Amino acid sequence: MKKKSRLLTLCLALCLALSACGGTQTTTSEDDSGSAAPDASASAEAEPAETSEVEADSSTTGTASAGSENTSITFETVEGSVTGDDGKEIVTYSYQVPTVTLADTAAQAAVQADLDAVVETFVAYVQGEFATQAEESYATYYEGTEDGSYGFSDDMTFVVSRIDDAVISLVIDEQGYSGGAHGWDNRYCRNYDAQTGETLTFEMLGENFRSTAEELVLAKAAEMQAEEEIFFEDYATYIPFVVCDGTELCADVYAQVYPDLYGADSSEEAPEGTLEPTYYLTQEGITFLSGEYVMQPYAGGIVEIFLSYDDLIDVMNSQYML
């Protein structure tokens, strides 16, 4: 079962029905930023679902780091679980807590605050809505049975794809299971100006960056489709879900992609908030993500579409290229 986005349960169901598990996209609430990340003890004390017990292990189960002495990110891994009222562990989860070090303290604070919000949102979700879903499923199908295989899971990790004096770019990966034939992989990104701490937008990357990127991604996707036929027949429709910098309003993109459902004459309400960023930078170029069920079916996994800096040299701000 593909993981339902925290804000898009109804929308995803409609989209799946429309296009045989076609275009979907995760979102982030507009008021998520600026919150402090919970430490392990705060996670343990967070109020659990009514009939569950939430536990978090405050010990470090693993650390990782990337960057140089003055520009670096380290990660501490925290594990936790949710237990049903009969003592059965029904949810396990883990997440990484990033700590940012930059030469400029204001830039460091800005990046840290945004990553803290990512972690806080994840913890609130797994201990809240996700735990409630697990409890309901457990009570319906497993409680009182001999089946010991039950368990929801959600694990969030960070991968630093680029960190230098110009750019900090990370890929955030959530992998889990919530019943059904298979698990899910929800992947999105964060990109920052290393000098100011600002979140990198397409407007910052270049005046015509968005339109050029959409054209190039579509062209690369067409080449891939001709070679392997990995996408849905109407894959081009979902390009707005693949080329995202996090500023796109869900209402606008859903109305564009699904005019019959979310257009001006429709009674359906599009999700609130903005889409998650779907691109990350490396030393060689920029990669865009087509998530599970966006342009391709589940069997296609997450598809990465790479554009080199040479591809973008006419439109991209040179300070962000290597």
Image (spheres, rainbow, N blue to C red):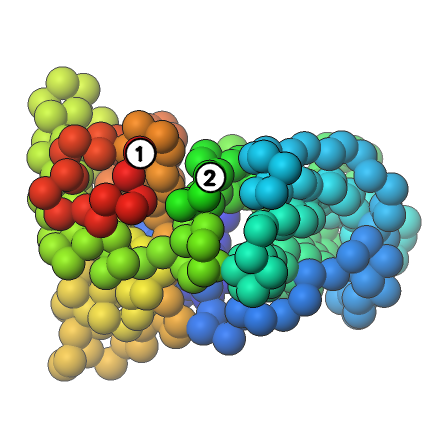
- Taking the spot 40% from the left edge, 45% from the top edge, the residue there is 166
* 165 on left or right of 297: right
Disc on res. 21: none
Task: From the top left corner, tell me how far across and down residue 136 is, in percent.
Answer: 68, 58
Chain-order first, disc 2 or disc 1 = 2
Name the kind of residue labelled 1 in the image.
Leu
Task: From the top left corner, tell me how far across and down residue 291 is, in percent.
Answer: 36, 42
Furthest residue in direction top, as rendered: 227
Q: Under tag 2, what secondary structure?
A: loop
Task: From the top left corner, tell me how far across and down residue 179 is, in percent.
Answer: 58, 42
Residue to which mark 2 is pinned: 164
* 288 on left or right of 311: right
Task: From the top left corner, tell me how far across and down residue 163 is, in percent.
Answer: 48, 39
Name the kind of residue labelled 2 in the image.
Asp
Q: Under tag 1, what secondary structure?
A: loop
Compared with 116, 56 (above or below) is above
Disc on res. 322: 1
In this rendered view, identify the residue nearer to me: 127 or 166.
166
In this rendered view, identify the residue nearer to me: 71 or 263.
71
Image quadrant of residue 196?
bottom left
- Taking the spot 19% from the left edge, 54% from the top edge, the residue there is 206
For label 1, the crowd category at 10 Å Cα-Cα, with few meaning under 14, some 14 to 19 and many 20 or more, is few
- Taking the spot 16% from the left edge, 31% from the top edge, the residue there is 310
Q: Is residue 44 visible?
A: no
- Taking the spot 81% from the left edge, 54% from the top edge, the residue there is 40
Q: CA distance from mark 2 to mark 1?
A: 10 Å
In this rendered view, identify the residue nearer to me: 264 or 240.
240
Image quadrant of residue 106?
bottom right
Contact between marks 2 and 1 (CB within 8 A): the answer is yes
